Image: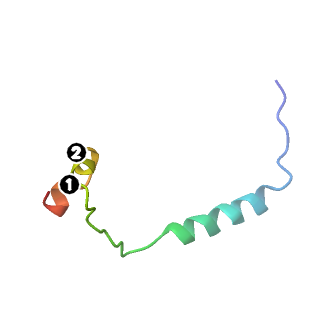
């Protein structure tokens, strides 16, 4: 087994942090769907009261 040096690790980490920053939000807009059968499989059905 041989360990290889990661030559662009800093660039990859920087890119990862930029993606994570884009995903980070404190407000999310949850809209209720019109089709109730979809609610059977939704993780948020108890929150939206369906």
Q: Are marks 2 and 1 in contact (CB under 8 Å)?
A: yes
Where does the N terminus fall, quadrant-wise? top right
Quarter of the image with the C terminus in it: bottom left
Q: Nearer the viewer, residue 9 or 30?
A: 30
Location of residue 29 in the rendering, given as x and y in whole percent from the top left corner:
34, 73
Residue receiving disc 2? 40
Q: Quadrant of residue 22?
A: bottom right
Secondary structure beneath dot 2 equals helix
Which of disc 1 and disc 2 is earlier in sequence? 2
Separation of residues labelled 2 and 1 (CA atoms): 8 Å
Q: Is residue 27 above or below residue 17?
A: below
Q: Is residue 13 above or below residue 28?
A: above
x, y percentage for residue 13?
70, 60
Residue located farthest toward the front when viewing the structure as drawn: 35
Q: Position of residue 3 (x, y in %)?
A: 82, 34
Q: Which mark is residue 7?
A: none
> At 27% across and 49% down in the image, what residue appears?
38
**Vertical relation: 32 (above or below) 38:** below
* Residue for point 22% across, 45% down: 40
Q: Nearer the viewer, residue 30 or 12?
A: 30
- In the visual, does 19 lie left or right of 46? right
Residue receiving disc 1: 45
């Amino acid at each position: 087994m041989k360990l290889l040096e990661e030559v662009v690790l800093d660039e990859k980490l920087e890119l990862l942090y930029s993606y994570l920053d884009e995903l980070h939000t404190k407000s999310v807009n949850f809209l209720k769907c019109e089709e109730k059968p979809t609610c059977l499989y939704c993780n948020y059905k108890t929150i939206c009261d369906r």
